Amino acid sequence: MKNKSNLSNHATWLRAHIQKPVVLVGMMGTGKSQLGARLARRLEMPFADSDSEIERRAGCSVAEVFTRDGQERFRAVEQNVILELLARTEPHIIATGGGAVTRPETLALIKAKAVSIWLNADPATILSRVRDVTTRPLLNQPDPEAALKNLLDARTALYQQADVHIMADNERIQETLDQMIVALYGYLRHRKE
Ligand code: S3P
């Protein structure tokens, strides 16, 4: 009971004190879009998803943009979309694609303009959640497990630069959401003192 009321106090405090966008980073399959949308609802803030925004503008799926324009072009578009989302004035929650942080300019933007949360998960959890690799061009390989390992090796040090770190293996999404509220509150409250 005490925990519930603490959580609700934390959420109330966050609604009143968050002044920057909150950006979720992390590998595919860690739940950035789903948890981001839930966090936004809980904090009564707007939610945006950079992949959905890219798809809306391109009029096709992320996988199609990769095939048609290549990864380099995709990353440039992704950088512009994230730049625009970060420029919105009211505080909001943004879920990014798993590779957004690999472009140094995009990582620098996130670090300068947002509070960032890294959703981390074990490779086995990620693989079980992204079974349909056809929608994930970088895992759509003969050996998705090896492809994921390579991506994690290259990216973990980038994700680690996020302000708040959360393990998102738990299938009970509500519990991960509660952890995010507690950790975000701890991080921002500490910085205000
Ligand atoms: C990518 C992750 C995808 C999408 C694209 C590239 C990556 O987003 O942006 O397929 O490089 O990890 P999700 O993390 O939302 O799956």
Image: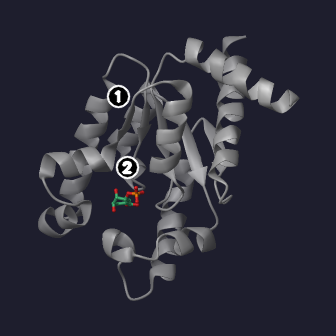
Question: Splitting the image into 4 quarters, where does residue 47 fall?
Answer: top left
Give the residue type that dot 2 points to: Ala
Q: Residue 101, how many percent across, how many down? A: 42, 48
- Left or right? Give the position of 1 relative to 153: right
Image height check: is 142 above or below 37?
below
User: Mark 1 vs mark 2: which is more N-terminal?
Assistant: 1
Give the residue type that dot 1 points to: Leu
Question: Is label 1 in contact with label 2 (beta carbons under 8 Å)?
Answer: no
Image height check: is 191 above or below 65?
above
Identify the residue under disc 2.
100
Residue plotted at (39% across, 52% down): 102
Q: Residue 23, how many percent across, how many down? A: 47, 36
Residue plotted at (72% across, 32% down): 182
Question: Splitting the image into 4 quarters, where does residue 142 fall?
Answer: bottom left
Q: Residue 12, how many percent across, how many down? A: 64, 17
State the CA–CA distance, disc 1 to disc 2: 13 Å
Identify the residue under disc 1.
86
Instruction: Name the quarter showing ligand 1.
Output: bottom left
- Left or right? Give the position of 79 relative to 45: left
Of residues 34 and 74, the one drawn nearer to the viewer in this rendering: 34
Badge 1 density bin: few <14, some 14–19, many ≥20, Cα 10 Å = many
Q: Residue 58, how many percent across, how many down? A: 13, 51
